[in-house]
Image (cartoon, rainbow, N blue to C red):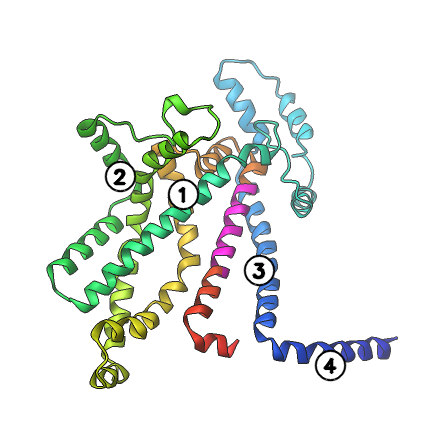
Amino acid sequence: MSNFLMGARDQLVSTVAPFFEKHPLVASGLSRLGLMMFTFFCMSIIIFLVIDLPEGDFATAKIAELQSLGQTVDPKMIEILRETYGLDKPILVRYWAWFSGLLTGDLGMSLSTQEPVWDTIKTRLPVTLLLMSAVLVFMFVTAIPIGIYSALRPYSVGDYVGTIIGFLGMATPNFVMAIIAILIGYEYFDTVITGLNSDEYLGQPMSWGKFWDSVQRSWVFILVLGTSGMATIIRKVCANLMEEINKPYVTTARAKGLSERELTMKYPVRLALIPIAATIGWKLPVLLGADIIVSQVMNMPTMGTLMLQALEKQDMVLAGDILLIMGGLTIIGTLISDVLLRLIDPRIRAGA
């Protein structure tokens, strides 16, 4: 039997190996897909343990809420609630019930709302994805040109202005910037910039008017989160580009008569952006973490505020699902970084 299995394995390897040798990108993609699945599984274990380890659970939080309202609660009610929500079962049983549901596309029932988790997050997830995408676009589209200008025109007025703006955004806490923006809008422009929509559009179906209203009210949120990550990108682009333009191949190309614009944009800028492309996946968890506080301050209907509410009520099902979705977005962001690296750097494509 063992000889048969070893023979089958050798035959499979001899059949598949030539295909992967001819298509290295496919082999690389499959290996990364397997690594992503393993990372997702490990992430689910860590998230469940982190949420479950603190003292107390949803039942004790519910009892405390009822007592704070002045209601008399029978001590046996805690055990009844724990049994009702399955909190009295061993941790491995509860974890497998939660994770096996995820594998089948069932996010479970929220303990606090007694509604399917998907019904709770389905309106907030698209808003979060759109806002985070807009923040990333604003961050890179603004920071990369400033970094290039700073490298080509060091110690100029534009270099100093761009650097100061970037470092102010990094040094100032996001929630402080949000509060300042709200106060400026109210005091000097008589405008309320909290919330995703004006009162007239609340509860209304999507329309061009509602969409434009959302755009007008979300730009401050995008500005607050975007400026916080600009300084790092500016300095990295500037340092990488200054290193590249001083290399011998640039001097040789300049001696051959290439214009400065063509000389700079064709190779040095492209090579200087390689380390930046590798950090896109790292920006997502930072933005999602900052989104929690800023969304709370600016009353934005994102996943961050929903997760904060779930943690306050110790709704481990809802909180765990949100954290796992955020972790999955981080994994996807890392995959996007890998794809961008292959598009920018032909050396990586050749080595794949």
Q: Image point 48% across, 27% down: which residue?
A: 205
Residue hosting label 4: 14
Q: Image point 24% across, 36% down: which residue?
A: 181
Q: Do the residues labelled 2 and 3 touch (CB within 8 Å)?
A: no
Residue 253 spot, x, y in % from top left: 25, 83
Residue 66 spot, x, y in % from top left: 53, 19
Residue 255 spot, x, y in % from top left: 20, 86
Query: Which region is colored magenta?
Result: 321-335
Badge 3 marks a residue whose secondary structure is helix
> Amino acid type of disc 3?
Met
Residue hosting label 3: 36
Q: Image point 62% across, 40% down: which residue?
A: 107
Q: How far apart are labels 3 and 4 at the CA level? A: 26 Å
Residue hosting label 1: 131
Placement of the N terminus among the 4 image quadrants: bottom right
Q: Quadrant of residue 63?
A: top right
Q: Quadrant of residue 214?
A: top left
